[in-house]
Image (cartoon, rainbow, N blue to C red):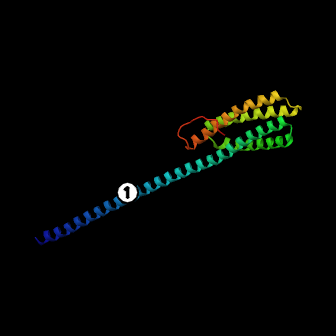
Amino acid sequence: MAVVGVVGTLGASLLTQSRADRNKRMEMQAAAEQRREERDHAEAMLETERARHRAEESIALRRACYITLNTAVRQYLTAQVDSVHALRNETGVEAALEKLEARRTTLRESYAEAQMIVPLKVMEGAGAASRRLNAGYGLLKQIAANAPYNQEDLDTFEAGVEQSRALLSELRQQMRFDLEVDTETASGTDL
């Protein structure tokens, strides 16, 4: 009987140790799973933060590009209008045409930058505005080359200024919509 008692005591110890080892393994597996879940969550949060940061950088980059482009198109149109006035008054023509050329170059540079940054929808508007402004530039250069200046040609150019203003206003609205400054597109002709 003593042998049975010793075997029972040893068996109980082994069974208890086995259960303790199994519980310890389960606890370790649960802790490892918990760490894995926390690591996955942390990685997901980090990726979400990176995506948010990339989106903010993209908006900031587009905003800066839009400011430069908007300024350039406005100044180009203003230089065209100033050139018409100089041609009409036949004073300060050379200075006005030099300023016009400088504004044209500035627009070309900002347009080239925009081609690499801005969404296609906005680039379509920028392209239409740029083509219209460049057509006006070509007309002004033709008028300026033929002194005395033809007043009818100047009147024709001035009539086209409103088209330019409308295209620039539409472009500006597309940029504001893209930046989510405005939530719906609207058209206007303010400069």
The quarter holding residue 41 reads: bottom left
Q: Nearer the viewer, residue 46 or 131?
A: 131
The quarter holding residue 35 reads: bottom left
The mark total stands at 1
Q: Position of residue 189 (x, y in %)?
A: 64, 35
- Three-letter amino acid code at disc 1? Glu
Dividing the image into 4 quarters, which one contains the C terminus?
top right
Name the residue at the top extreme: 152
Q: Residue at x 55, y 48 (%)?
A: 55
Q: Position of residue 83 (x, y in %)?
A: 80, 38
Q: Is residue 10 left or right of residue 36?
A: left
Question: Which SS class for mark 1?
Answer: helix
Q: Nearer the viewer, residue 148 or 57?
A: 148
Q: Residue at x 36, y 61 (%)?
A: 31
Residue 151 drawn above or below residue 42: above
Q: Residue at x 71, y 36 (%)?
A: 130
Q: Position of residue 72 (x, y in %)?
A: 71, 43
Dividing the image into 4 quarters, which one contains the N terminus?
bottom left
> What is the crowding at mark 1: few (fewer than 14 residues within 10 Å), some, or many (at least 20)?
few
Name the residue at the right extreme: 147
The quarter holding residue 80 reads: top right
Name the residue at the front extreme: 89
Quickly name the residue at label 1: 33
Q: Position of residue 138 (x, y in %)?
A: 80, 33
